[in-house]
Image (spheres, coloured by chain):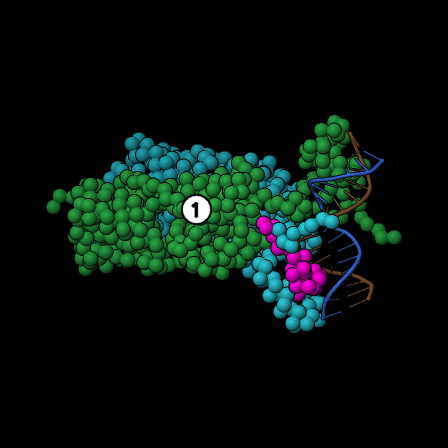
Chain colours: A green, B cyan, C blue, D brown
Amino acid sequence: MKKRPERSASARVTLADLARESGFSVSTISIVLNEAPLSQFIAAGTKARIHAVAKRLGYHPNAYARSLRKRRSHTIGVLVIDLSDPFCTLILKSIEKTLSDTEFLPLIMDAANQHKQFKRYLNILLEHGVEGLIVVANWLLMDTSLLADLEQYKIPTTLVGTEIQDSTLPSILVDNEQGGYLALQHLYSLGHRAVAFIRGPHQLIDSSRRWQGILRFAAEVDLQLRDQWIMQLSKSSDPNASFEEGRILTQEALQKQPGFSALLAFDDVTALGAIRALQQHNIRIPQDCSVIGFDDVPYAALSNPGLTTIRQPMEEMGRLAANRVLERLSSSKNDLAEQALLLPPELVSRKSTAVVPLR
Amino acid sequence: MKKRPERSASARVTLADLARESGFSVSTISIVLNEAPLSQFIAAGTKARIHAVAKRLGYHPNAYARSLRKRRSHTIGVLVIDLSDPFCTLILKSIEKTLSDTEFLPLIMDAANQHKQFKRYLNILLEHGVEGLIVVANWLLMDTSLLADLEQYKIPTTLVGTEIQDSTLPSILVDNEQGGYLALQHLYSLGHRAVAFIRGPHQLIDSSRRWQGILRFAAEVDLQLRDQWIMQLSKSSDPNASFEEGRILTQEALQKQPGFSALLAFDDVTALGAIRALQQHNIRIPQDCSVIGFDDVPYAALSNPGLTTIRQPMEEMGRLAANRVLERLSSSKNDLAEQALLLPPELVSRKSTAVVPLR
DNA sequence: TTGTATGCGTTATCAC
DNA sequence: GTGATAACGCATACAA
């Protein structure tokens, strides 16, 4: 006869343990603990005793067994391109908050800007049977091949934070074109005519969208852009690398072609790098030169002086992304060809921009 | 006779599906796909055909079923107090990186600074059968009651980022006392004798540790601290709130008791708030007043001027925390009463501190 | 070399 | 009111 210990030292407490300990059957206990419909027919005393035993032994239901049996994971995968990018973080927080009011648990994975990790975690999420998927992207990386993979799985997916060309995946992002427009409009309205630009990496569609907005405004007011004041960020996989690049580009511009009264940066971190260079040349912000960023990451409000920027509504983006997935999960309507949703950007005016200095 | 569809539209592909499609049995397929020991006896052609079918149908093993059967989750819970706090984020990234080389998957949960969420997610992690647990804390929240709960579960746990009084949980954190010492030493060595302080919340043990270090150095060099220059942060649940508090405290000090040549802040964000106030009073950093922070979050390097600070080795903290858990997982040695591990802080000298101005 | 049978912990269906 | 039993998808001991 095989001897089996009453309760093994390290293993978790199971329903069977509770059954042995309480004298009731496994099914009764399951019904009671889950408050299943049938539990209304169970004697109050029984319920109390079962709850007591469960508490005493420290019972925690086995989520794996439960999911296996119910054929549901109650889980939504959240695949973040880079957790250390505050832009992603803010969107993620909002997704989390939205999901915390639901029955769904976010499974958060961080691709750490690496193609390989992205694929690996995507696989893991699939193996864990996520019922929905949200991909939080920033402006880096994201080969198209990954998205081709994504589309073949039949689970509701939403992409938030950036746009992918030639993809039918529903995506949620800011209206970059309008953002570029607002940024230049702000500088222009302060009297700036000599404006320098640091464009984003040209591999990136966001860069050209913002630039289109800038050109649109320039055309409207007949403003000439000077080629020598148009700088260009290179592609990088480190969100903070643009600080150093912004600094160096600005420094070079100051040496070769000074004289601009304002600088429009691709994003906030780039803007901070530019400010560093300007201050090193004893150019005061905003008295001598105005600087405007893009995104409104937390850095922007905390920097000195506070950075004027074009705000992406990150909370709203996260919330909408989560809600879209939830909707498709509940209504089971599979309108595959959803439009990309463009959210309006907003000018946040702080202290890094001011009226153009008198000469 | 019950009709059953070859493959239902939405359900996942299972081993049974592959068996039906390929003609081999479930067990053979399992052996092949897992490259189990027995697979060396399987004909190469069989393997190839099985792999082909698996790929064609898009098979993903069901992690839940697998874990249930193997009685292992291959999972480590990472419970973060606040994902939007860059201090936590950096530690988390390091944990992730360390874990990505192992067979363990980090399950990341964000307590969002809320007691209730912390407990909820802790429960969920337990239900998912995490084999180890890492709690990433900042200086906020963390009632002792939570930790009491933690200790009762038998799974290897490490606390990283802060210290809990009266807890036997192994924790990894910076040597705050030494950090305080280094900070004041730095200012003193630059000639500063009139130093203002913004202390951390007094509910927090980190605050008093750092203060002890400050007092130790002051005693060594016989430096008098002036009470009216000693300010105090209140407890908050928002990591960025200390910016505003730092700003206001500094502003008040400037009105009531100006004349200090340096300011030592409890952390970087507080320091940035102080700098904002100083600049609003046309006090230049560092020519007129030096400012030093604590932590070295990414903000610090990006701010203008770059912030001198006491660095917590966050990468190392995360790595050590992960390794500790891994060790206890593999060696199954249960030395419960581990010491708290104190890591040395490091002075990072940037541009916000300089020699004391001549009067 | 490959197939059959069993059980992981849970829930759902049905029987008593 | 409560208990026995089957099945979820997989891995493995054992049989063939």
Pick the quarter of the image with the C terminus of chain B: top left
Work out whether residue B254 can be spotted.
yes
Instruction: State which quadrant residue A167 falls in.
Output: bottom left
Q: Main secondary structure of the magenta part?
A: helix
Foreground residue among B281 and A90:
A90
Magenta region: B9-32
| Residue A49, horizontal then vertical, whole percent | 75, 31
| Residue A203, horizontal then vertical, whole percent | 34, 59
Please report the residue visible at 47 percent of the width from the left and 45 percent of the height from the top: A335
Q: Please, which residue is most extreme toward the bottom here?
A: B44
Few, some or many residues within 10 Å of mark 1 (<14, 14–19, 20+): few
Amino acid at dot 1:
Glu
Foreground residue among A117 and A27:
A27
Please report the residue visible at 81 percent of the width from the left and 50 percent of the height from the top: A4
Please report the residue visible at 22 percent of the width from the left and 46 percent of the height from the top: A217
The residue that disc 1 covers is A338
SS for dot 1: loop
Q: How many marks?
A: 1
Instruction: State which quadrant residue A48 falls in.
Output: top right
Describe residue A64's horizontal placement relative to residue B174 as left or right: right
| Residue B289, horizontal then vertical, whole percent | 29, 43
